[in-house]
């Protein structure tokens, strides 16, 4: 039997088929199933699995696996092409100019596609930077680890996030099911989605509901349907909204003027932290500090201050001081020795 020569027609055909699979994996959308790989390669399901595994191992940071939204038991595979974009191809000045121009446009027919474009470019840049950092850190990461500690286990459904982001960008009203923690039951709600807030304790969808700004726990949202009804978000900014609270929860009628006292012993440690984006740090002759900022969210703030064991304590407003004292009393009363 004649030995197959290097560069034979079979090799070129296989190479061409693998390129076709790579192109299919890189198409816009959720990805392709095993069946499409089988069609491209003219191969069995077993070999299609090996081909998919080849790309998964070759491009670990770009490879994505999803469930088909129409057929949940079917797997879809995709290659993110962010690596193909040089880091300096789109720069921060260009994105700043696009953002500034978009804000000045009043015609929604022009503004919404530009907002969508800006969102896609930002995602592409962030993904490209992440991939570059992963590649740079791959060798270093063997000697590093993340400290263990309590972390929220909530996992957010990719398809729900996709729909919510689309509705936010297009200013579309949504219908969805929401499990209310206070009522302990699921109910149907209609809201105007304004933005997503990622927190340490919970992640939230910020919405307009009955004319007021409210927060819905992201993991408690299901069955999202985007309607054709549009709404106006006014001058709402998710960045500015996030600055108004310590943590994610917003107290009604806030934010308020907040003051903390930092004891002299805690001064050096406290100066290493940014407690709030708009904080003002006032030093005193005895070595203590006063920290001032506008915010709300007394419970999360009290939980955080409790970690300083009295080295940092709230001074005002009274609602914060009362909440802090109340938590200390509850903890003290709960310890039975």
Image: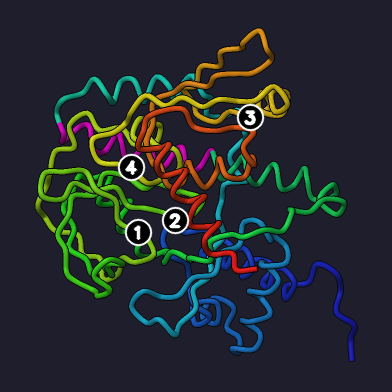
| Alpha carbon separation for disc pair 2 and 1 | 7 Å
Identify the residue position indicated by label 4 in the image. Answer: 250
Mark sitting earlier along the chain (2/3): 2
Relative to residue 105, is residue 172 depicted above or below? below
Point out which mark residue 273 bears. 3
Mark sitting earlier along the chain (3/1): 1
Q: Is residue 185 visible?
A: yes
Query: What quarter of the picture does the N terminus occupy?
Result: bottom right
User: Are discs 3 and 1 less than 8 Å apart at CB?
Assistant: no
| Alpha carbon separation for disc pair 4 and 1 | 13 Å
Q: Position of residue 261 (x, y in %)?
A: 55, 25
User: Are discs 2 and 1 less than 8 Å apart at CB?
Assistant: yes
Disc 1 is placed on an element classified as: strand
Between circles 4 and 1, the one closer to the viewer is 4
Q: Please state which of residues 228 and 164 is positioned toward the viewer in this rendering.
A: 164
Q: Position of residue 24 (x, y in %)?
A: 51, 64
**Magenta stretch, overall SS:** helix
**From which residue to which does the magenta span run?**
108-125
Counting other residues with Cα less than 10 Å from the Cα at mark 4, is it few (<14), some (14-19), or many (20 or more)? many
Identify the residue position indicated by label 2 in the image. Answer: 202
């Amino acid at each position: 039997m004649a030995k197959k020569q290097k560069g034979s027609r079979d090799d070129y055909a296989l190479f061409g088929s693998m390129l076709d699979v790579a192109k299919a994996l890189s198409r816009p959308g959720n990805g392709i199933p095993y069946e499409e790989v089988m069609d491209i390669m003219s191969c069995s399901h077993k070999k299609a699995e090996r081909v998919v595994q080849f790309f998964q191992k070759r491009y670990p940071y770009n490879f994505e696996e999803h469930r088909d939204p129409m057929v949940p038991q079917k797997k879809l595979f995709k290659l993110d092409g962010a690596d193909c974009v040089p880091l300096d191809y789109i720069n921060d000045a260009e994105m700043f100019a696009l953002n500034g121009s978009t804000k000045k446009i009043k015609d929604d027919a022009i503004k919404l596609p530009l907002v969508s474009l800006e969102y896609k470019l930002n995602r592409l840049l962030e993904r490209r930077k992440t991939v570059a950092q992963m590649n740079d850190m791959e060798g270093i990461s063997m000697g590093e680890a993340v400290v263990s500690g309590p972390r929220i286990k909530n996992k957010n459904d990719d398809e729900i996030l996709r729909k919510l982001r689309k509705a936010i960008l297009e200013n579309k009203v949504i219908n969805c099911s929401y499990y209310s923690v206070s009522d302990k039951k699921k109910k149907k709600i209609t809201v105007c989605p304004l933005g997503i807030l990622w927190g340490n304790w919970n992640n939230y969808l910020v919405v307009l509901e009955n004319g007021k700004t409210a927060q819905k726990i992201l993991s408690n949202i299901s069955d999202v349907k985007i309607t054709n009804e549009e709404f106006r978000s006014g001058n709402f900014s998710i960045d500015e909204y996030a600055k108004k609270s310590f943590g994610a929860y917003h107290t009604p009628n806030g934010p308020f003027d907040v003051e903390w006292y930092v004891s002299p012993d805690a001064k050096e440690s406290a100066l290493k932290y940014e407690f709030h984006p708009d904080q003002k740090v006032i030093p005193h002759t005895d070595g203590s500090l006063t920290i001032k900022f506008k915010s709300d969210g007394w419970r999360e703030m009290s939980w955080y201050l409790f970690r300083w064991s009295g080295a940092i304590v709230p001074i005002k407003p009274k609602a914060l001081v009362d909440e802090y004292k109340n938590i200390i009393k509850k903890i003290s009363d709960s310890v039975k020795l």
